[in-house]
Image (cartoon, rainbow, N blue to C red):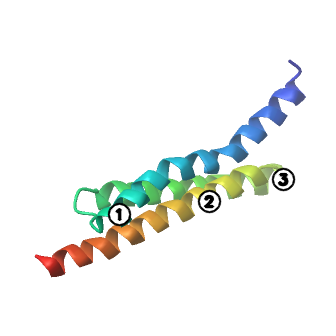
Amino acid sequence: MPAEKIVIVANFLQGCSPLLSLFAYLPQCRKIIANRSSRDISLTSWLVWLLSSAIAIFYAVIQYQVTGKGTALIFSSILVLVFVIITECLIAFYRKGDKSRV
C-alpha cells in the first residue's frame, strides 16, 4: 500500500478514536446514573485520564503548528477530553450525593 494511502487510513482511524472512546465511557456513565452512585469508581484514575487527555491535546496542537497537519488528532483529543470531563462530573456529582445519604 502506498504511503499516501496509509496516511489516509491512519487519519481516518484517528478520527474514529473519539467514537471508540465514547463507547467505552458510555457504560461507565450509564452505570453511575442508573445506580445514582459513584462509590465504586476511582476519581483518581479519571483525573489521570484528564491529565493524559490534556497532554494529548498539547501534543496535537504542537504537531499542527509544526507540520500544518493533524486536525483529526486535535479533534479526537478534544472529544476524549470532553468525555473524561463528563465522566468526572458525574463521579463528583454522585459522590457528593453518596456522602449526604450516609
Q: Amino acid at mark 1?
A: Ala
Which one is closest to the eye, mark 2 or mark 3? 2
Q: Residue at x 29, y 63 (%)?
A: 35
Q: Residue at x 48, y 67 (%)?
A: 86
Instruction: Please tell me whether residue 1 is drawn above or below residue 25 in the rendered image.
Output: above
Q: Position of residue 88 (x, y in %)?
A: 40, 66
Q: Can residue 58 be seen?
A: no
Label 3 sits on residue: 68
> From mark 2 to mark 3, how far is it between C-alphas?
20 Å
Do the numbered discs 1 and 3 sit on residues whose CB atoms are within 8 Å? no
Q: Earlier in the sequence, mark 1 or mark 2?
A: 1
Label 2 sits on residue: 79
> From mark 1 to mark 3, how far is it between C-alphas?
44 Å
Q: Amino acid at mark 2?
A: Leu
Q: Residue at x 43, y 63 (%)?
A: 87
Which one is closest to the eye, mark 1 or mark 2? 1
Residue 91 picture quarter: bottom left
Circle 2 packing at 10 Å, graded few (<14), some (14-19), many (20+), is some
Label 1 sits on residue: 34
In the structure shown, which secondary structural element does the residue marked by tag 3 occupy?
Answer: loop
Q: Earlier in the sequence, mark 1 or mark 3?
A: 1
